[in-house]
Amino acid sequence: MFLGVEWSVWKVVGWMGNFIFAARFTVQWYATEKKKQVSVPASFWWISLVGTLIMLCYAAFHLRDSVMIFAYAFNWIPYMRNLVLHYRHERAHRACPGCGVPSPPGANFCSRCGAKLEMAPAPATKA
């Protein structure tokens, strides 16, 4: 017993999952304050994914509670999708020929030096 809680390995796993899942809000808040605009970094989605999977394991293997299992069973889907979208967007950035700074896919000019950016290759279409 510590702090009125009977500790076990599963109790530590449950608390760890809760702590990790809650930490994602601190990450998002920090990123937003740093940019002075709403920002959700990839680390937010990674932390969400890890926290959800830990909580799902805790619910499924320790609690064996269908309500808790269902609460975490499908959360990983949008987290994974957001990670895929994030990394696709990141890969679509183009380097400026003048200064080498990465520019967003829709930009025509570099935000740092003003150089004209080369046209991005057209996406492949399915016939």
Image: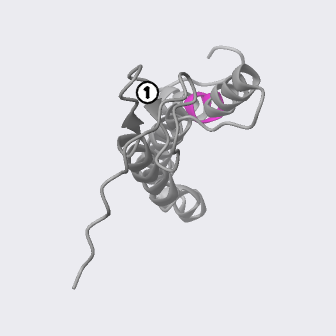
Using a 10 Å C-alpha cutoff, classify the residue at mark 1 as few (fewer than 14 neighbours), some (14 to 19) or many (20 or more): few
Q: Is residue 20 magenta?
A: yes
Q: Quadrant of the N terminus?
A: top right
Q: Amino acid at mark 1?
A: Val
Residue sitting nearer the eye, 77 or 16: 77
Considering the whole magenta stretch, tell me its main secondary structure. Answer: helix
Find residue 58 and report its horizontal and vertical position in percent: 47, 43
The question of residue 108 being in magenta is answered with no
Q: How many numbered marks appear?
A: 1
Q: Which residues are magenta?
A: 19-23
Residue at the spot 60% in from the left edge and 34% down from the top edge = 18
Residue, x 58% and y 29% (percent of image)?
111
Residue displayed at 53% across by 56% down: 75
Please name the residue that numbered disc 1 is placed on: 9
Q: Is 113 drawn above or below residue 124 in the view shown? A: above
Rendered image quadrant of residue 91? top left
Q: How is the image coloured?
A: one colour
Left or right side of 36 for 7: left
- Image spot of residue 106 (x, y percent): 51, 50
